[in-house]
Amino acid sequence: MKETIESSLAEERVFEPSEDFKARANMNDPDIYRKADEDLEGFWGDLAENIDWFEKWDRVLEWNPPHSNWFLNGKVNASYNCLDRHLSAKGDKPAIIWEGEMENTRTYTYNELFYSTCRFANALKELGVQKGDIVTIYLPMIPEAVIAMLACARIGAPHSVVFAGFSHEALAQRIENAGSKFVITCDGYYHKGKLIDQKEKTDMGLEKTEGVEHALVVNHTATPVNFIEGRDVWWHELEKKVDYQCPAEHMDSEDTLFLMYTSGTTGKPKGVVHSTGGYLVGTCITASWVFDLKDDDIYWCTADVGWITGHSYIAYGPLLNGATVLLYEGAPDYPEKGRFWDIIEKHGVTIFYTAPTAIRTFMKWGEHLPLKHDLSSLRLLGSVGEPINPKAWLWYYENIGGKRCPIVDTWWQTETGMIMITPLPGITSMKPGSAVRPFPGIKISILDEEGNAVPEGQGGYLAIEKPWPSMIRTIHGDEERFIKTYWSKWGTDIYMSGDGARIDRDGYVWVLGRLDDVIKVSGHRLGTMEIESSLVSHPAVAEAAVEGKEDEIKGEVIVGYVVLEADVPVSDELKEQLKGHVVDEIGPIARPAAIVFAEDLPKTRSGKIMRRVLRAITNNTDPGDVTTLQNPEVVEELKRKVHLSD
Ligand code: ATP
Ligand code: MG
């Protein structure tokens, strides 16, 4: 049997960016899609002109599936392209506006960012870092995180940023996997008003792994820390000793720019390797066309620099475009739940990029919070990380964007490096919940198990058929896993994303979530995301997750975990109502066998539902390692409740 995913949640409303927006957009030529398809190499070759090369490449692409080389023999430097080349025209323009959790602000102009980066780069050299050494960065959302990345790039040392909120074990694992001899960390940072002792976590991590020669420590909170003589060095002390001039290394286009470990939602994190030239070309153009970055924009992406979104769309993409980037240290609810809206008003943010999980949280907190603030500076909104359900999309559109801002729902992955499926606000219209259309030059298809295209409208595997410049080059130290994970389902020239999707009759792409999130009920394959979206569309529901529970007769039955909106009382009647609501929206086959009211759902640090944990809770098996959960305490609570619902 050719397996497809049944999909019947449809959202037909279409929204258009204003004529004015389209007319002024960086990219508003609808023919761009056709042009890119007709001459893929010509298309990417032209876009490579947006990057300054020390030596121009002599060929756009060499494709030996699944290995790609882009811009062959080109010599380039990422930090040079983010900094040096902007100095003559934009030296005094703010590059980073940093908003600290304690409402303190710091601004770096392009000149200042350049000098700080050069000194940081020289400090790294002073410590013995050489071209090719992988440097682990374990810093919170402070300007030094971006400076450290650019400094590594400047001297040709690939960086590996580990999310600051991760435990010392997670740090140790990643240092070890990367074979890092150098770690950049800080004394501490504030999170929701609490001082986090980052240096202590670093020390504990370093006890668990060998081979780290030096830790470079940024003084951020002026808290006393334990120093290990010979190993630990203060950045502010070394800074005084080093020169401010540091020429950018001429890197080969295919030299590694960084490693990024995936969030680990589905298994052991993979050290995704990205190279330099192609990554710069891909992130530069997507930042320009998708976010429509203009010289006077204040752009804010709320992701953490520890995720790929922070790499591509806080650091590299916007800085390559010479944009002003807002960087926020803290949490959305500190000191109060209106903090994000306060920041937008305070800094006049024009472009705002966040995740559906955050949007659903804001919905739960209520629209009175954004309504208290002047958000009229906003002109474009973005979403990334998970499928955004139509209810959340519409809430975002109305309450944050004032019905005037287009929303770009951007689908991409750590492995893709750049945005792959997205509206282009100067060209395409939008349907709430759809990521709309592959970026020009990106060829996707929806396939079944055997690699055949599924009929129009049906769900299947989201595959990518042609190489793209910022694509993953390998998994660090595990080429076999690289091939097995992405390039072996249908042959080495088709990328398997692991997500499901369908394309509707108007050509809009609907990402259905991960394929391992499919529940099989009586032979029907249903995507968890659609059932979740239908639950969330009920007015009483703020958030939902569904999981399959093994069942002797049906194979699996559906258990729905539901977080209710504030002040909605729980009742058995509501459970029945919700089951009926899913039946109305999707059909009887999707009727949940049980509904569990939860306070919270098990989530990763990046706010995604940790599927394997939910699956284990539902089926009463061992959830395994839960240390990278944001909220490990929910596991026991949910286990108890599911058991009671039997
Ligand atoms: P791991 O691969 O380690 O399990 P992860 O897939 O969560 O972790 P990321 O690379 O950060 O790590 O996330 C990419 C995934 O996020 C995509 O494969 C997709 O499932 C989801 N995603 C991202 N953006 C969107 C979007 N706009 N719509 C739907 N899903 C999205
Ligand atoms: Mg993934």
Image (spheres, grey):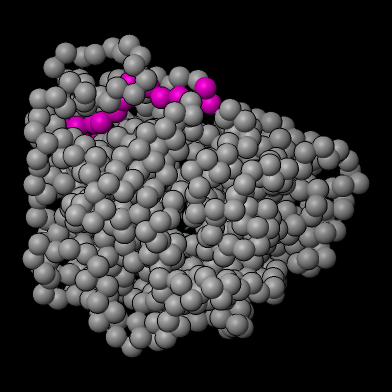
The spot of residue 481 in percent (x, y) is 32, 55
Residue 618 in sight in this render: no
Rendered residue at 49%/62% (across/down)? 410
**217 or 245, which lies in front?**
245
**410 or 300, which lies in front?**
300
The spot of residue 143 in percent (x, y) is 33, 36
Rendered residue at 40%/56% (across/down)? 296
Question: 117 above or below 63?
Answer: above
In the image, is residue 185 part of the stretch drawn in magenta? yes
The spot of residue 329 in percent (x, y) is 44, 34
Q: Quick check: 458 left or right of 497?
A: right
Q: Quick check: 47 left or right of 365?
A: left
Question: 238 above or below 595?
Answer: above
In terms of image quadrants, where is residue 566? top right
The spot of residue 586 in percent (x, y) is 76, 67
Residue farthest toward the right in the current orientation of the protein: 573
Rendered residue at 36%/77% (across/down)? 441
**104 or 262, which lies in front?**
104
Residue 577 in sight in this render: yes
Rendered residue at 58%/27% (across/down)? 335
Q: Quick check: 263 left or right of 629?
A: left
Question: 65 above or below 642?
Answer: below
In the image, is residue 610 part of the stretch drawn in magenta? no
How many numbered badges does the structure rendering display? 0
**574 or 104, which lies in front?**
104
Q: Quadrant of the N terminus?
A: bottom right
* Region in magenta: 174-193
Q: Quadrant of the C terminus?
A: top right
Q: Quick check: 63 left or right of 357?
A: left
